[in-house]
Image: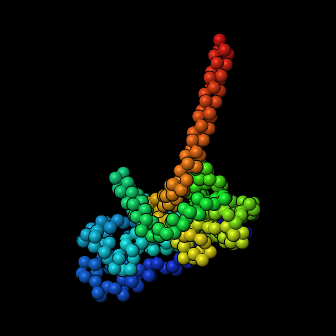
Amino acid sequence: MSTNPDTDVEAGADTDPEDSLRARVESRLPGMPPAERRVAEYLRDHAQAIIFATAEEIGQAVGTSDATVVRTSKNLGYSGLPDLKRSIGQQMIHGTAPSVRLNQRIDSAGQETATLLGHVFSEAGERLAETWRLTPREQFDQAVELLAGAREVVAFGLGLAEIPARFLSMKLTRLGRPARLVGAAGFLLADGLLALRDQDVVVIYAPARLTTEIDVLLDHARSVGARSILITDSLGSTLADRVTVVLPAVHSATGYTAEGFSSLLVTDCLLLGVAAQDRERSTTGSELLRVLRAGLASEGSRRGSGTRRRSSRGEA
């Protein structure tokens, strides 16, 4: 039986991150300086709104600096404002209808082009910075080694998560590495798993939802001895004991930026690491791709010329 990747409840998520924020504020408030106390109270009382706001906007609302906002977030036990916003955002994603979230994003971003650009690029920067901060270097190095030494890489993703999975399989193939995409759900997934072997590596893109397909894939990978790499926002702790490597890809708290944005950047890093492992093999694959494309372009040009000549004769 298949599960829907767009509606499954996230495994391991806090049941109410807003309550968690409120509890943190209440416990730390007495020991905070006045400016941080004002920020903490604002965060507590405007939890749903702050996920769409920048540190500067929160600071302006409270009458303090963006640095004080960031410092307050850290004093509340978060790594920074992006971490706090992600915690609140998870509750909003799973507890609010998509149409409501869309209208909230539009209302928050406003209609001015400069404002829209500012919100989107601000969140993109926050996501990348947080992903960079959370990435364990030894885990990343191990992931590169696994991909470079694999007999075949099987990239898996459902829904929007299929986009970075498809990107990985295509780019690895161009680097001369055997790779394929498995993006089927339900019974069709079984066909994609039949050829999995002990020297293979499975790369699973699963931002926040644990599905039946992921469960079956991980169980089968373990049964045949294949290694696995999980690229995720919040399933790392849930699946850490079932995968070989976990790499973070911070999700959007607001929806301003695409789901696969962080995953694609992590994938780019992995691909560059694999290319560096064997430059000759990588450049050979790239050169073959160029030759094939040149042949296709020439054939297309010849067909086009023939069509034009036949058309001219017909007109005459």
User: Which x, y percent locates residue 140?
Assistant: 51, 65
Give the answer, above or below, for where 2 lies relative to 121. below
> Is residue 201 found left or right of 19 in the rendered image?
right
- Quadrant where the N terminus sits is bottom right
Estimate the x, y position of residue 23 in percent, counting from the top left: 41, 85
Residue 55: image quadrant is: bottom left
Q: Position of residue 315 (x, y in %)?
A: 65, 15
- Which of the two residues, 193 or 163, is positioned nearer the viewer here? 193
181 up-or-down from 206: above or below: above
Count of number-bearing discs: 0
Image quarter hosting the C terminus: top right
Residue at x 38%, y 80% (from the top left corner): 77
Relative side of 149 to 98, left or right: right
Determine the residue positioned at 44% across, 82% down: 20
Q: Picture coordinates of residue 287 (x, y %)?
A: 57, 41
Res 159 visible: no
Left or right: 190 as drawn, with respect to 124: right
Residue at horizontal 39 percent and vertical 60 percent from the top:
125
Comparing 229 with 5, the one in front is 229
At horizontal 51% and vertical 65% (from top left) the residue drawn is 141
The colour scheme used to paint the residues is rainbow
Q: Is residue 29 left or right of residue 136?
A: left
Residue 54 visible: yes
